Image: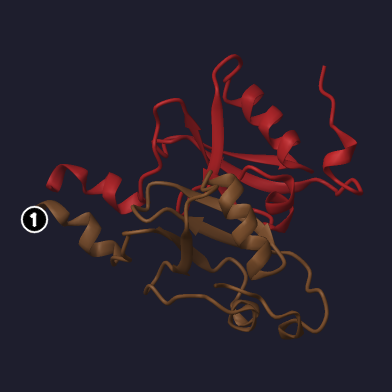
Chain colours: A brown, B red
Amino acid sequence: TQQLVSEAVPETPRARPWRVSTADRSVRKGIMACSLQDLLHKVRDILMLKDKPFSLVLEEDGTAVETEGYFQALAGNTVFMVLQKGQKWQPPSEQGTRYQL
Amino acid sequence: TQQLVSEAVPETPRARPWRVSTADRSVRKGIMACSLQDLLHKVRDILMLKDKPFSLVLEEDGTAVETEGYFQALAGNTVFMVLQKGQKWQPPSEQGTRYQL
């Protein structure tokens, strides 16, 4: 089970801008969030994922972002990808040339 | 008549310059706006989109800009793209080399 430990964030950081993409890269949204938990909540609402388990990874290389500390160390406007159950990160080039395989 | 909702923005920010492109990148306009709502109104007037639904995305990667907070976090002179119903963001290179595929 996922639990965010409050000690991880000493003082409430201010909201920063992030970009969140769907796994197929067809939709990308600009979202303000001050914490990983805040971003997870907003992604769930904006992409209508209520009751659908999902995780956030970095869009560029699929790195799983699971802790508040790692999230806070990211630069603003980092691009995340939402992975729902069964979805896997794929590099952009592979998606673009999918029909060549 | 144009009316800006004050609740959307805690304090009225001053107008900043933005660039707005059509989906085919054939037209690009410089527009001053203090808020997302202000920009949407001006884009509607300048590109004659009255009664035509449209959204604004970032020209660089198609990120949807849908909230005042995310808009305010953007740097001035950010380039937007107008997407009307049925239009999809495409990367610049793909548009330029489309006929080579």
Residue B38 lies, in percent from the top left, at 75, 35
Q: Secondary structure at mark 1?
A: helix
Which residue is situated farthest in the front direction here? A1
Left or right: where does residue A62 sit relative to residue A47?
left
Q: Residue at x 70, y 48 (%)?
A: B17
**Residue B13 point in image, percent of width and height:** 86, 49
Query: Nearest the camera: B80 or B28?
Result: B80
Q: Which residue is mark 1?
A: A100
Q: Residue at x 81, y 74 (%)?
A: A12
Pick the front one: B29 or A50: A50
Q: In the displayed structure, does residue B68 sit left or right of residue A54?
A: right
Task: Tell which residue pokes out farthest to the top in this image.
Answer: B51
The N terminus of chain A lies in which quarter of the figure? bottom right
Q: Quadrant of the C terminus of chain A?
A: bottom left
Q: Position of residue B84 (x, y in %)?
A: 48, 27
Front in this rendered view, residue B43 or A94 = A94
Left or right: B26 in relation to B4: left
Residue at the image position 17 percent from the left and 57 percent from the top: A97
Question: In this rendering, is residue A10 above or below A36?
Answer: below
Is there any visible trace of residue B75 in the rendered image? no
Chain identity of mark 1: A
Is B1 placed above or below A76 here? above
